Image: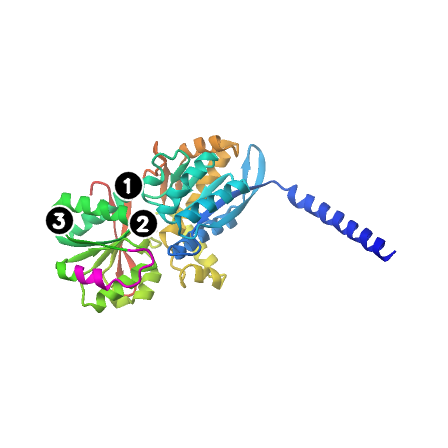
Amino acid sequence: MKKRMISVICGLSMAVMALAGMNVYAEDVIKIGVFEPQTGENGGGGLQELQGARYANEIRPTVTIDGTEYKVELDEVDNKSDKTEAVTAAQKLVADGVVAVIGSYGSGVSIAAGPTFAEAQIPAVGCSCTNPQVTNGCDYYFRVCFLDPFQGSVMAQYAFDEGYKNVAVIDQLGDDYSTGLANFFIKQFETLGGTIATTQQFQTNQSDFKAILTEVKASGADAIFAPSSITTAPLIIKQARELGIEVPFMAGDTWYNQTIIDNAGAAECEGTVVSTFFDENDDSNAIATDFVSGYKAWLNEDQKRIDNNGGNDAIVGNSALCFDTYNVICDALEAAGSTEGEAVKAALAAIDGDYVTGHITFDAVGDADKDSAYIDIAKDGKFEFLKIVSVGE
């Protein structure tokens, strides 16, 4: 009798749970994948990008597609800063039925995952993956940032104009972002008439850079261009200063991060110059101004958000780009009036609007038509805006 009663009660409980579940899943929901490194070498930057998506989702939790309002659910996966893991993470998003994908921080993992998204006809929009190979040959990949050829040229022009005629270059072997940006810098700098004093490479997960820095010191370079990750940057800077290398460092967008100054030391970083996608102190864009005030307030609501941001509420460019990426995808979904991959891809190609990081349209390859970059300099323990450089300047 007891067994029968238990069975009846269990049956009723399951029925109630099923009905509750029906109510939950009757709600119209679509998933947008967030394909970012939450761990590994690029985990710090990935978490900052991820938080940009989370904030955007809180600000804009729904989209209206063909007259129906859908709740947008973020499907977050960790690609672990690894090309093999990236494919596995991409496959999970495909299996989960996402309608579009945000990410990734790190060009290498984006390149690795591209064929998986394309085969499934799921549009992906990169936030800060700047290597040209991300979109080349991959019809389903777009991105909202400028590219490494432009970024490398801008930094080479800056170096030459500042009077640096003999520059050392340090990059990470096997990292598409690092080697790509280094090569574009070298090409432009030599075209301008500058000399590359030495080129040095290091391995992934390397922590001792003294051997290559000794070569840099011996080269007599008057500046160092070192595109690398948030993890390696402070190690390179500190070890260079320990060896008595006092020349200024230059780098790309990944170095525009307060955690690098905090970890390497304000004095050690003084004069370091970087290119970046966004500067929170630029008040010329009302959309950006609203984002800065809102995002800072959001960060400070939760200590974990501050921790994920690097221990402060400074806004890095990739967070702003990820906020834009989320909204670009939502705008495309609404314009398409469909979640079908080909329709969303076509709507993305037609995007033409103003966002936090500026006006965004895409060219035939899927790259954002952006022609300017912020140049910032480390001064008194903070990055300060120096100037905006546009193509041809």
Query: In this picture, which residue range is highlighted in magenta?
Result: 203-216
Which class describes the residues within 10 Å of circle 1: few (<14), some (14-19), or many (20+)?
A: few
Mark drawn on residue 144: none
Give residue 90's position: percent from left, percent from top. 46, 44
Report helix, strand or loop for mark 1: loop
Give residue 261's position: percent from left, percent from top. 31, 63
Observer able to see residue 128: no
In this view of the protein, which residue sits in the foreground, 277 or 223? 223
Which three-letter amino acid code belongs to the residue tagged 2? Answer: Asp
* Mark 2, residue position: 175
Mark drawn on residue 194: 3
Give residue 33's position: percent from left, percent from top. 49, 44
Q: Is residue 318 left or right of residue 14?
A: left
Name the N-terminal-most of marks 3 and 1: 3
Which-is-in-front pick, marks 2 and 1? 2
Which three-letter amino acid code belongs to the residue tagged 1? Answer: Asp
Report helix, strand or loop for mark 3: loop
Which class describes the residues within 10 Å of circle 2: few (<14), some (14-19), or many (20+)?
A: some
Badges 2 and 1: C-beta atoms under 8 Å apart? no
Mark drawn on residue 371: 1
Which class describes the residues within 10 Å of circle 3: few (<14), some (14-19), or many (20+)?
A: many
